[in-house]
Amino acid sequence: MKPMWVVLLAVSLTAACAPRAFTRGQYGDPAEISMLGDDWNQNDMQLTARDIVSSIETWVTQNPSAEKPVVILETFKNRTTEHIDTQALYDHIKTALIHSGKFTFLDKAARPEIAQESDYQNNSGYVDPNQAVATGKQKGAQFLLGGVITSTIQQVGPDKVAYYKTTFELTSIETTEIVWTDQKEIAKHFKKKSVGF
């Protein structure tokens, strides 16, 4: 039988090595600036989306047309070493622009399912022809909205700077002309604290 002090030591070591769980939390304001690390975070995404939306809304106001521009999203390019949820950034921008009432967005990702459902309604024989969705009436996109994000990290001694640049372009599908472009730069400065005894 092991001595009691061996058992107590084993228990205390196990407790010390076990991962600590967060036992209490609270809701916070998503718009509040929080910099807990130098990685791309939700605040960077919100700041970028806000500035890009403002810029592209200004462009469409200065270039009015009879109809709202019909836009489709290009695959976003992440040229950083981080995993960044670029779809979430697109969603922020797309949602704000749709709410502005100045743009129409087409859902490229839904096309395969839409085609499958349209085929089912029109060719399966199971759907009332009077209720089947008509084919050949989808809108055609006029513009392609694309983006790319890059980053650089500089560190000298205890000082560290994380720099992100996000560039967006709106390209005419008919002419391939880039009709609008803008970028958002973010620099975050950090200083490592020395550990004293």
Image (cartoon, grey):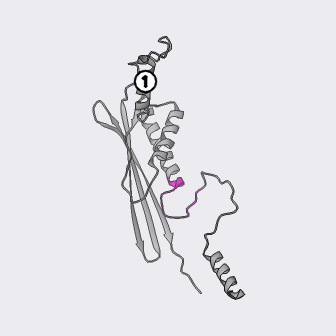
Q: Position of residue 133 (x, y in %)?
A: 46, 18
Q: How many marks?
A: 1
What residue occupies the far left of the structure in this picture?
A: 175
Indicate the quadrant where residue 152 lies.
bottom left
Nearer to me, 68 or 147: 147
Q: Is residue 39 magenta?
A: yes
Where 197 sits versus 51, above or below? below
Q: Is residue 51 visible?
A: no
Q: Position of residue 149 (x, y in %)?
A: 39, 52
Image side of residue 46 versus residue 119, left or right? right
Nearer to me, 99 or 24: 24
Nearer to me, 86 or 47: 86
Amino acid at pointer 1: Glu
Give SS at disc 1: loop
Nearer to me, 63 or 191: 191
Q: Which quarter of the rendered picture does the N terminus lie within?
A: bottom right
Indicate the quadrant where residue 153 lies.
bottom left
Which residue is identified by label 1? 67
Q: Report the residue at 48% width, 31% height from top.
A: 102
What residue occupies the far front of the structure in this picture?
A: 1
Q: Report the residue at 47% width, 76% height from top.
A: 158
Image side of residue 18 versus residue 189, left or right? right
**First to last magenta residue range:** 33-44
What residue occupies the far right of the structure in this picture?
A: 4
Q: Position of residue 110 (x, y in %)?
A: 44, 33
Indicate the quadrant where residue 161 lies.
bottom left
Where 51 sits versus 160, above or below? above
Q: Main secondary structure of the magenta part?
A: loop
Q: Is residue 78 magenta?
A: no
| Number of other residues with Cα within 10 Å of mark 1, as a class: few under 14, some 14 to 19, many 20 or more | few
Q: Which quarter of the rendered picture does the C terminus lie within?
A: bottom right
Q: Position of residue 178 (x, y in %)?
A: 32, 39
